[in-house]
Image: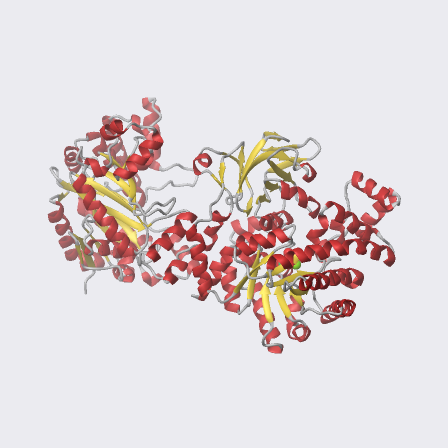
């Protein structure tokens, strides 16, 4: 059986289907070569040899493959016209590991293998660059010494032994940069490096290229059983008998004069997705020169070059003389390259990111891979490729990374401006987008400047209006489901939460980060997609919902079977979500409606009343307001189902906490300030999220449930009169026992019947429940007897299943993730292993009782792609998420179904 597979000269022994035998890299090199792409010739030693090595040891394995390796080297020599270790024209190779999946912890690349005191002279002559040759030699010993000979720091405090020698020489020569070394310095370094190897290992540095090669091959095999690689395998469950392949490939040089060069290119525009070949190159340069930015790289195509010149304000004549495109400078090389890029894209059926080198008039393709791209480019490329017949409809949908769609849904920072930005701290990327504004510390001052960033230790429902006005929200505390985060996502507003490094002082109106103090009115910018907090202004641009974006959504809906609803609290949210394709509302948090100025008063009046009459009076005032809100929402949804949840948060959140507001409330209600204070204190709870909230409110004060049920039913009837269908689904929060549900259901149905009688008309409505307390999941079969639908409140379910307070978890979750106790924030990504079981069980038990039970999810997880996939597998009817995540969930739902 063959143990070594050759490639080069547009042929290959292997191909891309042989990833298990040749490793990913080897299989791809073979594939490129066999479809006629000129890759530098080389060979791959199979993964099976690695396994043999583990069994038989070094000597036996070298014996096994010696003949094949020698023949393969001879093959490279004849194709390249060079000789291994030659003083005139040396063959130099690279050696790389390559398992079937790319794996950190394996041996790094060794470049320029084959260099020794003879070959370095050959390399100098060949490139006409003695400095380059000696620098390559110096680097080779360093690389080989490190990865093959184990020349690593001895203690973790030590620096790299070779770096130490270089530092010493720099100190002696009073220089600071590597580039300041003279050729003699480099020669001295080579000598000193070899000396260090001898001292440390007891052996001379191998100067025979064959010894070097075998050393490197065995080092690759050994690295398969290195600690890091083993740890990584264990983590991913990859078996040890996979082994790694070894790739040996001829080095080619782009710095051999005017006829040489190197570059990077893309088959399509990675920024916009436009179907134009593009890229950059440099004449007489090495790979890293193109990206290092020392010289100005030139454009590959003439079109690209002209566009570039326009931006750089360079005259056409100047451009042609000094910055010609490859197309103009080397037309035949360009033509060849253009042919390969077309071929590779057609072959891999995806945008390719390629590296190439021209060595003395001969073009080599060093690498190709699927190129990274922006969200906009991702969408455009997928749709274009579908239209061009390169990929199928389903493939186009699967090409979209759901979470990357976010970029298309929020204002974005200008990429260029972002590069120069000064990041002062980082928090959680709670709600994506870009915001620039002047700092304010109080919600009621959010309109103090034209553009503001509301900076708070944390936000409360009282801050809602201010949050709506501000450009962005920044909090020092709170996690991904904190008030600020949830509300901001719903608004599609940029928000960074839990930025622990911020010291906020409301009294002095300052924000301190490290030693630096920022004052009210200072400009800052938030990158809600990364969590970066930036000093000063950064330019933003509005997102464009391009045609392709709409098209990909239409395709998604064709395949999605699970529906996507939205969490919306206002008619405006509902409209935004409708435009994004929401198929209903899965959660209206009615409490958010109570925070507008005139409503909060009535709400507070109700809360502070000691008597039923007092409460009813206040509720009387709230009723018309709620009713009109519901009408607005029902109207926006035009006959789609709307789930309205009864009042949920602890009442304490509604009462005023500042003395001033307390005083004015006392005046308004004709009671003493003292009475207000006492009531506020009474409502204080040790653990409000597990306290007097949810259905517990409706059970203590049935009149609240009554008012809300009436507002919902009356709104639906009013719309009916106007010829608009409304489908209310009334949802009871925080059910833990069947009796809780029964008691609230009775109030709702009695109220509805009363209204029907009064109006002499009826509408259809449903009564269902949130499933968000673990106990409710256990008795789901019983609850389903009475409930029309279930909606999983996975925010609370996660809180209660883990026992992590939603409001405090951000203090320790980052540490948990850093230490690997958890792999992700369970408030962001549904914990399928644990909380997921509760969801599965409740769904199954509920449907045992009522096979057609409608089941959805309305926790924050409804907009997370992996959680959406889980919901699909569990058989949920819909997921519900904030308006701006609707397209993401629609796509994730389609992908789950494909
Ligand atoms: C939940 O608990 O998942 C939920 C949707 O409700 P809230 O976040 O309002 O508690
Ligand atoms: Mg909840």
Give residue 393's position: percent from left, percent from top. Answer: 37, 61
Q: Quadrant of the N terminus?
A: bottom left
Give the residue at x 32% y 27%.
Answer: 169
- The colour scheme used to paint the residues is secondary structure
Give the residue at x 59% y 35%.
Answer: 451
How many numbered marks does the figure carry? 0
Q: Is residue 212 left or right of residue 597?
A: left
Q: Is residue 519 left or right of residue 224?
A: right
Camera-side residue of 871 and 585: 585
Q: Is residue 535 above or below residue 39?
A: above
Give residue 274's position: percent from left, percent from top. Answer: 35, 46
Q: Quadrant of the C terminus?
A: bottom left
Q: Is residue 49 above or below residue 142?
A: below
Q: Is residue 342 above or below residue 452?
A: below
Q: Confirm whether residue 211 shows in the render.
A: yes
Q: Confirm whether residue 93 shows in the render.
A: no
**Hey, which quadrant is residue 760 in on the image?**
bottom right
């Amino acid at each position: 059986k063959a143990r070594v597979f050759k490639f080069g000269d547009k042929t290959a022994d292997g191909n891309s289907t042989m990833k298990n035998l040749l490793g990913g890299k080897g299989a791809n090199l073979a594939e490129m070569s066999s479809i006629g792409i000129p890759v530098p010739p080389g060979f791959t030693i199979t993964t099976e040899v690695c396994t043999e090595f583990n069994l038989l040891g070094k000597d036996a394995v070298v014996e096994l493959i010696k003949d094949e390796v020698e023949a393969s080297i001879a093959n490279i020599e004849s194709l390249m016209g060079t000789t291994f270790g030659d003083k005139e024209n040396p063959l130099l190779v690279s050696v790389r590991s390559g398992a079937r999946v790319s794996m950190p912890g394996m041996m790094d690349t060794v470049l320029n293998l084959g260099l020794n005191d003879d070959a370095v002279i050959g390399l100098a002559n060949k490139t006409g660059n003695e400095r380059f040759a000696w620098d390559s030699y110096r680097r080779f010993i360093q690389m080989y010494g490190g990865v093959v000979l184990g020349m690593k720091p001895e203690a973790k405090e030590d620096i790299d032994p070779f770096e130490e020698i270089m530092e010493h020489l720099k100190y002696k020569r009073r220089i600071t940069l590597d580039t300041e070394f003279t050729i003699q310095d480099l020669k001295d370094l080579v000598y000193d490096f070899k000396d260090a190897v001898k001292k440390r290992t007891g052996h001379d540095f191998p100067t025979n290229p064959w010894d070097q090669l075998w050393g490197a091959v065995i080092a690759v095999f050994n690295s398969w059983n290195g600690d890091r690689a083993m740890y990584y395998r264990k983590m991913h469950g990859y078996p040890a008998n996979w082994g790694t392949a070894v790739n040996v490939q001829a080095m080619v040089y782009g710095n051999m004069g005017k006829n040489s060069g190197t570059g990077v290119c893309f088959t399509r525009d990675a920024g916009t997705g436009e179907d134009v070949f593009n890229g950059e190159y440099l004449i007489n340069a090495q790979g890293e020169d193109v990206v290092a930015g020392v010289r100005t790289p030139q454009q590959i195509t003439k079109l690209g070059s002209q566009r570039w010149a326009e931006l750089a304000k360079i005259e056409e004549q100047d451009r042609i003389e000094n910055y010609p495109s490859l197309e103009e400078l080397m037309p035949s090389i360009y033509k060849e390259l253009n042919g390969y890029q077309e071929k590779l894209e057609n072959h891999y059926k995806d945008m390719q990111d390629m590296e190439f080198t021209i060595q003395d008039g001969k073009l080599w393709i060093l690498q190709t891979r699927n190129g990274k791209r922006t969200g906009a480019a991702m969408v455009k490329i997928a749709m274009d490729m579908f239209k061009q017949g390169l990929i199928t409809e389903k493939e186009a949908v699967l090409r979209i990374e759901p979470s990357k769609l976010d970029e298309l849904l929020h204002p974005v920072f200008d990429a260029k401006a972002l590069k120069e930005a000064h990041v002062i701290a980082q928090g959680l990327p709670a709600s994506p987008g870009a915001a620039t504004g002047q700092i304010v510390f109080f919600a009621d001052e959010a309109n103090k400047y034209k553009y503001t960033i509301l900076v708070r230790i944390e936000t409360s429902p009282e801050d809602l209006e201010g949050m709506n006005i501000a450009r962005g929200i920044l909090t020092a505390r709170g996690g991904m489901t904190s008030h600020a985060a949830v509300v901001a996502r719903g608004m599609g507003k940029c928000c960074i939460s839990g930025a622990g490094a911020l010291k906020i002082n409301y009294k002095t109106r300052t924000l301190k980060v490290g030693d630096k103090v920022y004052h009210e009115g200072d400009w800052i910018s938030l990158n809600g997609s990364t969590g970066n907090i930036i000093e000063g202004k950064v330019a933003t641009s509005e997102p464009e919902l391009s045609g392709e974006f709409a098209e990909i959504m239409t395709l998604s809906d064709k395949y999605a079977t699970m529906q996507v609803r939205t969490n919306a609290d206002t008619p405006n949210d509902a409209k935004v979500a409708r435009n994004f394709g929401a198929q209903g509302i899965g959660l209206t948090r009615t409490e958010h409606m109570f925070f507008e100025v005139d409503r909060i008063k009535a709400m507070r009046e109700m809360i502070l009343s000691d008597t039923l009459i007092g409460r009813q009076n206040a509720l009387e005032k709230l009723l018309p307001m709620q009713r009109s809100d519901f009408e607005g929402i029902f109207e926006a949804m035009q006959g789609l189902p709307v789930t309205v949840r009864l009042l949920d948060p602890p009442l304490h959140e509604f009462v005023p906490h500042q003395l001033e507001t307390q005083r004015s409330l006392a005046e308004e209600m004709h009671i003493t300030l003292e009475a207000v204070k006492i009531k506020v204190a009474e409502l204080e709870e040790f653990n409000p999220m597990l306290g007097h909230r949810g259905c517990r409110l409706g059970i203590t004060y049935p009149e609240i449930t009554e008012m809300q049920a009436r507002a919902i039913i009356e709104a639906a009837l009013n719309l009916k009169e106007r010829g608009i269908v409304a489908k209310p689904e009334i949802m009871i929060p925080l059910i833990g026992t069947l009796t809780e549900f029964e008691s609230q259901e009775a109030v709702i149905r009695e109220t509805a019947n009363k209204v029907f009688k009064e109006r002499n008309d009826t509408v259809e409505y449903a009564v269902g429940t949130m499933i968000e307390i673990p106990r409710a999941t256990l008795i789901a079969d019983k609850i389903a007897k009475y409930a029309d639908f279930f909606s999983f409140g996975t925010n609370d379910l996660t809180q209660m299943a883990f026992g992590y307070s939603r409001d405090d978890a951000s203090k320790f979750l980052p540490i948990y993730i850093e230490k690997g106790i958890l792999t992700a924030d369970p408030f962001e990504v549904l914990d399928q292993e644990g909380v997921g079981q509760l969801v599965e069980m409740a769904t199954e038990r509920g449907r045992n009782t009522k096979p057609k039970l409608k089941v959805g999810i309305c926790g924050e997880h409804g907009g997370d792609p992996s959680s959406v996939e889980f919901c699909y597998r569990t058989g949920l009817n819909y997921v519900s998420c904030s308006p701006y995540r609707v397209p993401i969930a629609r796509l994730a739902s389609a992908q789950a179904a494909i």
